[in-house]
Structures are given as C-alpha cells and as structure tokens.
Image (cartoon, rainbow, N blue to C red):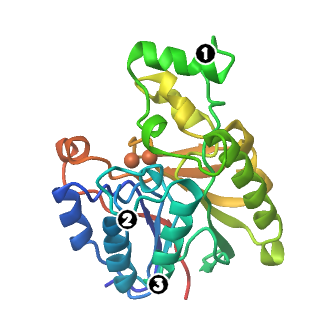
Amino acid sequence: MFDLPSLLAISDLHVGFARNRELVQELRPRHEGDWLLVAGDVADHAEQIVWALGLLASRFAKVIWAPGNHELWTRADDPVQLRGVARYEHLVGLLREVGVVTPEDPYPVWPGADGEVAVAALFVGYDYSFRVPQVHTKEEALELAYERGTVCTDEVLLHPDPYPSREAWCDARLAYTQARLEARSGCLPTILVNHYPLVREPTLVLRHPEFAIWCGTERTADWHLRFNAAAVVYGHLHIPRSTVYDGVPFEEVSVGYPREWQPRGPAPQPRVIATTTR
Ligand SMILES: [Fe+2]
Ligand SMILES: [Fe+2]
C-alpha cells in the first residue's frame, strides 16, 4: 500500500471483451483513499456498464464517470432499448444507485498537494467541427468519411432523441456544462474529465484524420484555461499519451481493445493525475 491516496484515471475499458473484464476484475486501489476517474467507453450494454463501475465503486473511495459514445449506443441486443437522453438519464440513475459520481452530480473536491481542486466529470459530445482543412461542412465531412470507409458506428447506434441531431444535443450539453462550471463553488481550479479531448490537437495524430469529426468540438478549445484546469483527462482516441497545451497537462488514459493493448505489453493501469499531502 502507498502512504497517501492518489487521484487515478482510466478510460475505454470496453468490458464486452473477456480480457478487459479480467483487467477490471484485477483493478484495485493502491491506497484505501484512492479515487478513480473513468472517462467513458466502459461497455456497450447497460448491464456491463453497471457491473464494471459498481465493482470499481466497491473498491475505490470514489469513482467518477463521464460517459463515452459506447455507453450511449442503443444496440439491438441490449435489453435496455432507451435512446439518447432517456438512455443517458437511465444510466445516471443506475450508476448513482451503485455509488458512482456522474456528470449530473456536484463536483467532488480533491485535497490536492497544491490546494483543493474541483473534479468535474463532463458530458460534452461532438458537433462535427473537427473537420480536415479542405472540408467546410458536416455534409462534406461525412461524405469524405463514407468515401474512405471510416464512418463511426455512432451514425447508426448513437441516437440523439429527443434532439434532432447529435450536434444539437452537444449544443445543449455545452450550455448546461458551461453554466455548471462557471457556478462551481469557490471558483476552485478544476480537473476536467471528458470522453473527448477538449482541444483539437490530440486528434491530429489519428491514422484517419477524417474520423476527428466524431472526437470533440471546437467550442471547448479554451475551457482548460477558462476553467483553470490543473489537468484534463480524456480517452476515446485509443492513443494513450500525455501532452501539454498552454501549460496544462492533457492525459489520454484509454485501455482500448485487447488487440490494441496486448502487443504493447502488460495490462494498462490507471494513471496518477494528482496526489495529496493528507
Ligand atoms: Fe473507446
Ligand atoms: Fe469512444
């Protein structure tokens, strides 16, 4: 056991895969006071999402979740056939029951080594604004992706109901989230946790650059500065790494699919985002 608790982060557990389920079963805190941030893509099926996060919540002092696109898919073989906002709200209810903190709950405060920080799990989607340079509209961007065979499954399984489009849902989430962050208690520094990167730069290394339209929105480009972020945690890209933008560390903490992480070596572990002195 470590002497002091840490704020840890992981994402893209994709527990539909047996090897990733084992990885979650083996995942334990290093200190009884450790918190775990889970930045989305836990699983595609409601039952598996609740199983994984419930197990982690029984082990870590606090588990804080931000949804990924996979949680929001409505697959034909999931007994939960709710779509869009109704599915999201249903998951929030189930996860609260097992003690998980959701983007609809007050932001927990971490007693950081440099002072208190508000840990804000966000649910902000994408609006097709991360387009490649020669493309100017969502329609052109989608056309290019269809031509190249790199269309995200969200187009089929992630329903925005009752919003008319995924970008309209994103627009509503941006307004809601911005207001919550502006009203955070004591204007504390933040640790921002979102499935998608809040800035575009991490998507520039995608093997298929036209896929970036499903990876975030230009409208969060200054949030790490505006909301005084000590760190930004994200996943989705399945390109785990640490980068710094404007002096703020951005941590991509994805596990990804077994075929992605197994060739790299041992099972990926949560990354330390912050420590404490007490
Ligand atoms: Fe993922
Ligand atoms: Fe994702």
Question: Is 81 positioned to the left or the right of 114 in the image?
Answer: left
Is label 1 within 8 A of ligand 2 (CB to nearest ligand atom)?
no
Instruction: Determine crowd level at label 1: few under 14, some 14-19, many 20+ residues with C-alpha closer than 10 A.
Output: few
Residue 127 drawn at (x, y percent) = 65, 37
What residue is shown at x 66% (from left), y 40% (from top)? 167
What residue is shown at x 31% (from left), y 55% (from top)? 14
Q: CA distance from mark 3 to mark 2?
A: 14 Å
Given the image, on which type of amino acid does mark 2 rest? Answer: Ala
Q: CA distance from mark 3 to mark 1?
A: 43 Å
Q: In the image, is residue 141 above or below residue 242?
A: above
Given the image, on which type of amino acid does mark 1 rest? Answer: Glu
Identify which residue, 29 or 184, lies in the foreground: 184
Instruction: Determine crowd level at label 3: few under 14, some 14-19, many 20+ residues with C-alpha closer than 10 A.
Output: few
Secondary structure beneath disc 3? helix
Circle number at residue 46: 2
Q: CA distance from mark 2 to mark 1?
A: 34 Å
What residue is shown at x 56% (from left), y 83% (from top)? 277
**Mark 2 or mark 1: whose residue is earlier in sequence:** 2
Circle number at residue 97: 3
Instruction: Determine crowd level at label 2: few under 14, some 14-19, many 20+ residues with C-alpha closer than 10 A.
Output: many
Question: Is 105 positioned to the left or the right of 150 in the image?
Answer: right
Is label 3 within 8 A of ligand 2 (CB to nearest ligand atom)?
no
Residue 129 drawn at (x, y percent) = 66, 30
Q: Report whether residue 29 is seen.
A: no
Secondary structure beneath disc 2? helix
**Mark 3 or mark 2: whose residue is earlier in sequence:** 2
Q: Disc 3 vs disc 2: Cβ atoms closer than 8 Å?
A: no
Residue identifier under label 1: 140
Given the image, on which type of amino acid does mark 3 rest? Answer: Glu
